[in-house]
Amino acid sequence: MGFWKNLWSNKLDVTPDVLFGRSYNGILSPQQTQAWNQATNYFNQGEFKRSIQSLFEYLNTAHQNNIIAIQNSNMLEYELVQGSKVIKIFVDQLQFYSEVKIAVCKELHVGFMRKALETNFDLQYARYTLDEEQHLCLVFDSHLEEASPYKIFNGLKEMALLADEQDDILINAFEQLVPINVNHIIDIDKAQKSIKWTFFNQVIDIITAEGVLGTLNRDRFPGALVYIYLDAIYKLDYLIKPESKVAEIINQAHLNYFDKPDENALSKVYSLESKILEFKDISKDDFYKELYHVTHTFEMNSSVPFAIICQIFDTELQGILWYEENKHDFVIFAICGYLIGFCLYNYALPQPVAELSHLYYRIVEPKYFSDLGFTTPYNKTDDIAKWEYPIKSEVKAILKRNQSRYPQMNLDVKLDFSSRLKFFISYITLIRNLNL
């Protein structure tokens, strides 16, 4: 996450303490790659505990302090940090055992117990349990001779991501559950929370206002409204980085749209609207509670070949033509934002794409970044041509610092500054043509 904090510093060269997005863009070091190879070799040789040790060397990210080795003469013992949760790991001569406490149960309630039981049927490695002290836990264990690096990695990842996602959601949903083991969470200052709260409400007010579609009829052009809604929720996820109820609503809205292929477009619009209206029920206090800094061991998103990104961009760029011919510029801006946001929300992007996507939001929302303490030369009301030099300079700098890792990358910066519309279309096209 350090990259995002240092991409744009302020005039005094002091970096605002602000994080963005779901992905920490961790790049494996040579030492981590070597540790993974050692883990698999040790396991194949029957040296199971040494395999586990090498696996945790692989998982340890130096700049994040996400793995803590506990000194214990009788067994291997570790703590693994994933967002708001800490997973405890114990390895003796026969067994690998890991556990994360989700919450304290003040009393048992059929609601969360049923939810936990239903979730167990969908899990491949982990399972919900109640321990002797009435803690709701997730557990993953294995006989050591079956604990291959692949199994342990996938099992810990499943448990860690679920625990980090569900703890706040369950605690907010059931008053019988109380938080536990959250001392490692770093709160952010109230000034930053206030800026994010203001921005959050501004975005929601814009997309729920009457006339958001201009002269377009929503029943005839539901797709236009979809772009506007999805652009907004992905933008909120990336720029605000919520950790609880807002994040849950965004995820449900995303799933409601993409996991129902048989539903017609208008029904999907109504489904998106119903989720977006839930944002209005979130109080300022509850919003503030889900803004904090945490460390992650596992990426929420998976990497995809750049060709997949190109296919997504190609499909939407073709759809832009009709809106451009009919001068519905606001829909084109939403399509561009949707493309950037969708990819950031769903994938661990190649570094140049991630950096250019971040720069896109700097250009689109300059006041938000300025309010957070970042220096920005952009102003939403200015003629985009005024910012040709700083934008091109930053794009070239991004490409240059990633050139050694992507030697085949297209370094040609073709951007059209004749209008904001032409600029954003050309910016999206530039990302699509990177040739990574």
Image: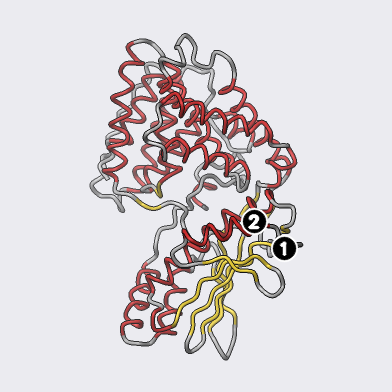
The quadrant in which residue 135 appears is bottom right
Q: Is the Cβ of the residue at disc 1 closer than 8 Å to that at disc 2?
A: yes
> At 67% from the left edge and 49% from the top edge, which residue is drawn?
173
Residue 121 position within the rendered picture, expressed as x and y whole percent measured from the top left:
48, 61
Q: Is residue 289 left or right of residue 59?
A: right
Helix, strand or loop at mark 2: helix
Helix, strand or loop at mark 1: strand
Residue 225, placed above or below residue 198: above
Residue 38 position within the rendered picture, expressed as x and y whole percent measured from the top left:
35, 78
Residue 139, placed above or below residue 24: below
Q: Which residue type carries mark 2?
A: Phe
Q: Is residue 410 left or right of residue 247?
A: left
> Which class describes the residues within 10 Å of circle 2: few (<14), some (14-19), or many (20+)?
some
Residue 196 position within the rendered picture, expressed as x and y whole percent measured from the top left:
65, 37
The label on residue 112 is 2
Q: Is residue 2 left or right of residue 393?
A: right
> At 69% from the left edge and 36% from the top edge, which residue is drawn?
282
For the residues labelled 1 and 2, the Cα–Cα distance comes to 10 Å
Q: Nearer the viewer, residue 386 or 294?
A: 294
> According to the image, label 1 marks what residue?
105
> At 54% from the left edge and 44% from the top edge, which residue is drawn?
20
Quick one: label 1 or label 2, which is nearer the N terminus? 1
Q: Which residue type carries mark 1?
A: Cys
Marks 1, 2: nearer the viewer: 2
Residue 166, placed above or below residue 432: below
Residue 148, placed above or below residue 114: below
The quadrant in which residue 310 appears is top left
> Which class describes the residues within 10 Å of circle 1: few (<14), some (14-19), or many (20+)?
many
> Is the C terminus in the top left, top right, bottom left or bottom right quadrant?
top left
> At 70% from the left edge and 58% from the top edge, which residue is drawn?
109
The quadrant in which residue 318 appears is top left
The label on residue 209 is none
